[in-house]
Image: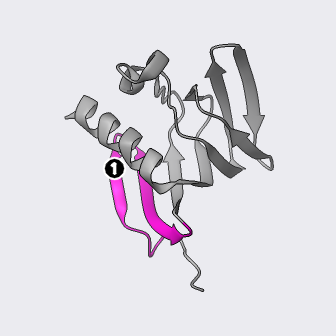
């Protein structure tokens, strides 16, 4: 078993204050360390996915900041110190600078990340 830190996790995406790092953690799961600057809205990058929302489930912990999670059934605010499960069908928006560590099924997560990178490209 191996532990992971933000510093030894490869950068998957970065720019405009965004720092997104991910690596396979075992058990078909990927760990991600995310820093989203205040005002980051992932909804535009998710356009074209089913319901224009992220369809990958995530389990995580909000280390810093506040984030609005929009779903087809409404929205909820998460704050630093909260653990979460975000099921398929969500789009996050950083209300403050946000730091997150989360775990996601590798195959589904890679599909979403590839889509987001293509939208940005």
Question: For the point 41% across and 26% down, which residue is it?
Answer: 46
Question: For the point 71% across and 18% down, which residue is it?
Answer: 75
Q: Quadrant of residue 29?
A: bottom right
Q: Position of residue 116 (x, y in %)?
A: 34, 35
Q: Position of residue 14 (x, y in %)?
A: 34, 49
In the rendered structure, the answer to whether residue 55 lies left or right of residue 67 reads left
Q: Is residue 34 above or below residue 45?
A: below
Q: Quadrant of residue 113?
A: top left
Residue position marked by numbered label 1 in the rendering: 13
Question: For the point 45% across and 47% down, which residue is it?
Answer: 109
Q: Position of residue 49 (x, y in %)?
A: 40, 24
Q: Which residues are magenta?
A: 6-27
SS at circle 1: strand
Q: Is residue 43 above or below residue 106?
A: above
Q: Is residue 41 magenta?
A: no
Tell me, yes or no, if residue 7 can be seen here.
yes
Tell me, yes or no, if residue 6 can be seen here.
no
In the rendered structure, the answer to whether residue 88 lies left or right of residue 43 reads right
Quadrant of the rendering where the C terminus is positioned: top left
Question: For the point 52% across and 57% down, which residue is it?
Answer: 32
Quadrant of the rendering where the N terminus is positioned: bottom right
């Amino acid at each position: 078993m191996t532990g992971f830190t933000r510093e030894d996790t490869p950068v998957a995406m970065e720019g405009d204050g965004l720092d997104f790092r991910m690596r396979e953690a075992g058990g078909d799961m990927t760990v991600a360390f995310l820093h989203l600057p205040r005002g980051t809205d992932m909804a535009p990058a998710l356009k074209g996915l089913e319901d224009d929302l992220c369809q990958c489930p995530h389990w995580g912990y909000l280390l810093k900041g506040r984030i609005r999670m929009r779903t087809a059934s409404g929205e909820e605010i998460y704050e630093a110190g909260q653990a979460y499960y975000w099921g398929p069908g969500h789009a996050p928006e950083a209300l403050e600078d946000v730091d997150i560590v989360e775990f996601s099924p590798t195959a589904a997560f890679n599909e979403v990340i590839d889509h987001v990178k293509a939208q940005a490209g």
